[in-house]
């Protein structure tokens, strides 16, 4: 059962599209000046397609019988056995400085991030920082799942 789903904030999406848009314009003007417009258009189309996939990225948390499933669709998915989870708490909000997607934040800490509110999920081997729209509710739901409620 999916208990959380978070997406990139509108302000982050606009920032990314602004940077990509400016880059594509420079690319196309350069390609036109160099007389290679068709290859320039193909590269620009590829950049726009990859960017579209990134800004549509979604982080979700689901619970199953004996595991927690964390996804960063469409790029990443992992299952964390509930027996390995030692603590679940709210974490500080994340932003562009931590990055988006699956991230290595520090030694033994991984992030599955789209920015904004997050939870911290501690396991035997690793700490996970996972984006969620409602960290208190999600942490409580996971703790209930851990206790078998």
Image (cartoon, rainbow, N blue to C red):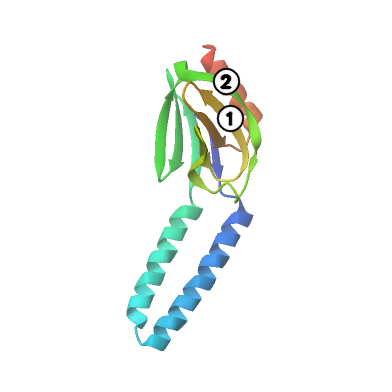
- Give me the residue at 49% from left, 46% from top: 101
Q: Residues within 10 Å of mark 1 (few under 14, many from 20)?
A: many
Residue 96 versus residue 41: which sits nearer the camera?
96
Q: Looking at the image, is 75 positioned above or below residue 30?
A: above
Q: Position of residue 124 (x, y in %)?
A: 48, 20
Residue ranking furthest to the front: 107
**What residue sits right under mark 2 in the picture?**
87
Quarter assignment of residue 88: top right
Q: Earlier in the sequence, mark 1 or mark 2?
A: 2
Q: Position of residue 68 (x, y in %)?
A: 46, 25
Q: Is residue 144 left or right of residue 62?
A: right
Cβ–Cβ under 8 Å for marks 1 and 2: yes
Q: Quadrant of the C terminus?
A: top right
Which labelled disc corresponds to residue 42?
Answer: none
Q: Nearer the viewer, residue 98 or 10?
A: 98
53 versus 4 height, above or below: below
Q: Viewer-proximal residue, 62 or 77?
A: 77
Q: Position of residue 131 (x, y in %)?
A: 57, 38
Residue drawn 46% across and 58% down? 52
Disc 1 to disc 2, C-alpha distance? 8 Å
Judging from the image, what secondary structure is the residue with disc 2 in?
strand
* Badge 2 density bin: few <14, some 14–19, many ≥20, Cα 10 Å: some
Farthest residue toward the top? 148
- Residue 128, above or below 114: above
Q: Under tag 1, what secondary structure?
A: strand
Q: Residue at x 60, y 55 (%)?
A: 12
- Residue at x-position 64% and y-position 30%: 90
Residue designated by label 1: 120
């Amino acid at each position: 059962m999916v208990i959380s789903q978070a997406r990139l904030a509108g302000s982050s999406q606009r920032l990314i599209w602004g940077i990509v848009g400016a880059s594509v314009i420079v690319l196309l003007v350069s390609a036109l000046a160099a007389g290679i417009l068709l290859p320039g258009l193909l590269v620009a189309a590829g950049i726009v397609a990859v960017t579209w996939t990134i800004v549509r990225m979604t982080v979700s948390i689901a619970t199953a019988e004996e595991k927690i499933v964390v996804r960063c669709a469409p790029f990443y998915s992992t299952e964390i056995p509930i027996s390995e989870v030692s603590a679940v708490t709210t974490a500080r909000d994340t932003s562009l400085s931590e990055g988006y997607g699956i991230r290595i934040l520090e030694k033994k800490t991984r992030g599955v991030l789209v920015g904004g509110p997050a939870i911290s999920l501690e396991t035997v081997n690793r700490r996970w920082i996972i984006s969620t729209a409602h960290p208190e509710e999600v942490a409580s739901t996971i703790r209930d799942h851990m206790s078998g409620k």
